[in-house]
Image (spheres, rainbow, N blue to C red):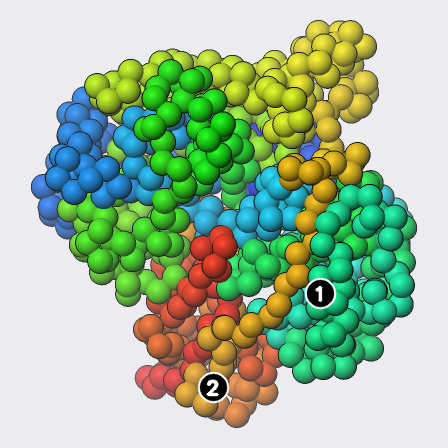
Amino acid sequence: TIPVKDVAEWKYTTCNYCSTGCAIEIGLNDKGRIVTSRGHAGADVNRGKLCIKGLLEHELFESPGRGRMPLMRDKAHLPFQPASWDVALDKTAAKIKEIQAKYGRDSFAVVSTGQLLTEEFYTLGKLVRGQIGTNNYDGNTTLCMASAVSGYKRSFGSDGPPGCYGDFEHTHCLMAFGSNLPEQHPIIYWRLKEALEKRKFPLIVIDPRVTMLAQFADIHLPITPGTDTVLINAMLHVIFKEGLEDKDYIARHTNGIDEIRTLVLEQYDPKTAQHVCGIDEDRIRQVARLYAKAPAAMSIWTMGINQSTHGSDGVVNINNLNLVTGNIGKPGGTSLSITGQCNAMGTREWSSCSGLPGYRALEKEKDRKAVAEFWNIDESFFPAARGLAQTDIFPAIESGEIKGLWLIATNPMTSMPNQPRIRKAMENLEFLVVQDVYEDVETNQYSHVFLPAAVWAEKEGCHTNTERRVNLTRNVLPPFADSKADFWIFNEMAQRFQDRNAIHFPPTPEGAFEEMKELSKGAGRTLDISGMSYDRIEAARGIQWPYSEEQALADEAQFGPAGQFDMKQRMDFLGNPRLYTDGVFQTPDGRAKLIPVRFVNNNECPDDEYPFWLNSGRVVEHFHTRTRTGKIGNCNKFSPTPYMELNPDAAQELGIEHQSYVRLVSRRGDAVVMVQLTHRVGRDMVFIPFHFHDCVNRLTLGLLDPYSRQPAFKQNAVRIEKIDQQ
Ligand code: SF4
């Protein structure tokens, strides 16, 4: 709505909400004030488009509730007192040391996010792994994509989505598992829609709810929640039975075919599987044939797979389907997890949460040695296995095993399942430091120290998006009031732990990026960013790893130095859009693993007392726990309150009216919510957007996946109680 003539200057940056990774230009007027945002027309990801969140992202800079200065208090819930940065950081460092001296190194935990910049993740990892030395360090990304990480590692020997958005333009069949792109990742959806308009191919959507994506599908499979592995096994049964597998690919690039074939042929006939997964046997046969006969077929998935007690197995089985049909590493044939947060990939790659930087593993002695040598510390400082995941840290706080916690850009008082237990855990902490852009974030009620962080384009560094594209955020403005870039806060904290390990911390994000490049070098490594530089990334509007020094030199010889690329030539100059194109995986023998997946029904299923499935998901206007979008006028205006989708037939039986309020009750707690009648949900399901405080997560149980420790947010049982509307 701001006329472009009011804009004196456009500044390049990258959107800080979802993992699509849209390139944004921020418009400043002649007084240096930010007045608008627009999509960058030259960026391959979004080609000038933005969704509502990106279009209004500039409103964040001056939004209410922002932290202005560090705050401290002796006890949670007492009034805060302002403090200088030195005092707040000294107190935080002293409390960490005091708790660790009293109860042991692992009695202090750190939980971060998927929303910092990559250099910040790397610096935080160096501080936590190399100096603070606690093994109880994780990101809130365990709530969204840990199952994808685990599944990729089990199948391919390493994390890293092997495909890209460009695969939409080459595929002949696309299956979307639990992924509602129009609301979750609107610009990825726009890319898919463009591809579908140019060249028709079947879009198959597997989702228990008639989502917006399901409405556009050629085939919608309304699956019983949590049974995706049964459907995939039944599809594999059909593929093997009818000889539709890619025998040559299986023989050359995989191990384990006999076990998986035996399992699915003996136990997953569609005739019996249909009674578990709720999809008619003929439909299962139809989609299996469509997928296997397509010259190239791809699968995408999001939280419908990841947030489940079978999350990691679900990912492994999607990988099985693609390996068996030869659909990995070829244009239009891939297994593409659509990640959640803007830089969830950055934390996977560089934060050291579940390992060491650059996809190195704590369990491998050579990796511990390599990083210890690089940081110039003794390798015995590193543990030989990862510690607790975020979802295990809170129970450990509740039991008294963990006494202190540092939360960085995460809001467990809204985001974690089973809120009554999280509340108890927070009350049990001896010391909590909250580092966030907003001081009114719900979790801050429990803190002893609050550290105000700069937001998004008030700082500089990289994001990696879903398709492994590293893009740059330039700092458009200085940090608000006395807030500071997270990078600065970590570096300052590191100075207070030099007595443990005297490690060098580069003073600028670009310096940290240069360190990461060094660490990424090595023969056969997929996560190689050594050919990137800030200038080259900005000129190319993002580069997809792997991108080695050799490749960069060859590109420069062809196209000229970074900053002088011709825009048309640049489009051929984006790193590597696909992994495993040569069929060589990151396993010891280079072959992918076909892993048989058996289904065990361990969900909290509806019963007589709690007869409805409780499902949750996103709305397009909001991001995560609304700490940011809840402050933006139009995002809030279009989606101001939580609501519950209820099937009209179920409503009629219960005597419930549209837009009335009901009490929803689970074994954990209750929540009052407004009813929206819709056929999007079946007779036995209700759906609530997860963004709102004191709502859906008062009800969720959050059983954990055994491999990824990711909670099953979407498979819980509830009952509905009418409320007297007077
Ligand atoms: Fe930002 Fe995602 Fe919207 Fe793109 S699709 S503008 S990255 S929120």
Is disc 2's CB within 8 Å of ligand 1? no
The picture places residue 514, in percent across and down from the top left corner, at 51, 15
Cα gap from disc 2 to disc 1, whole angstroms: 26 Å
* Above or below: residue 534 compared with residue 368: above
Q: Residues within 10 Å of mark 1 (few under 14, many from 20)?
A: many
Q: Residues within 10 Å of mark 2 (few under 14, many from 20)?
A: few
Which quarter of the figure is the N terminus placed in?
top right
Identify the image quadrant of residue 471. top right
Could you tell me which residue is drawn at 78 percent across and 35 percent down? 581
Res. 193 visible in picture: no
Tag 1 residue = 232
Q: Amino acid at mark 2?
A: Asp
The picture places residue 612, in percent across and down from the top left corner, at 50, 80
Could you tell me which residue is drawn at 55 percent across and 49 percent down? 150
The picture places residue 615, in percent across and down from the top left corner, at 52, 69
Tag 2 residue = 607
Identify the image quadrant of residue 664. bottom left
Q: Secondary structure at mark 2?
A: loop
* Above or below: residue 389 compared with residue 234: above
- Which label sits in the foreground, 2 or 1? 1
47 left or right, relative to 348 = right
Could you tell me which residue is drawn at 52 percent across and 86 percent down? 651
Seen from the viewer's position, the closer of residues 605 and 222 is 605
Could you tell me which residue is drawn at 34 percent across and 28 percent down? 380
Q: Amino acid at mark 1?
A: Ile
Tag count: 2
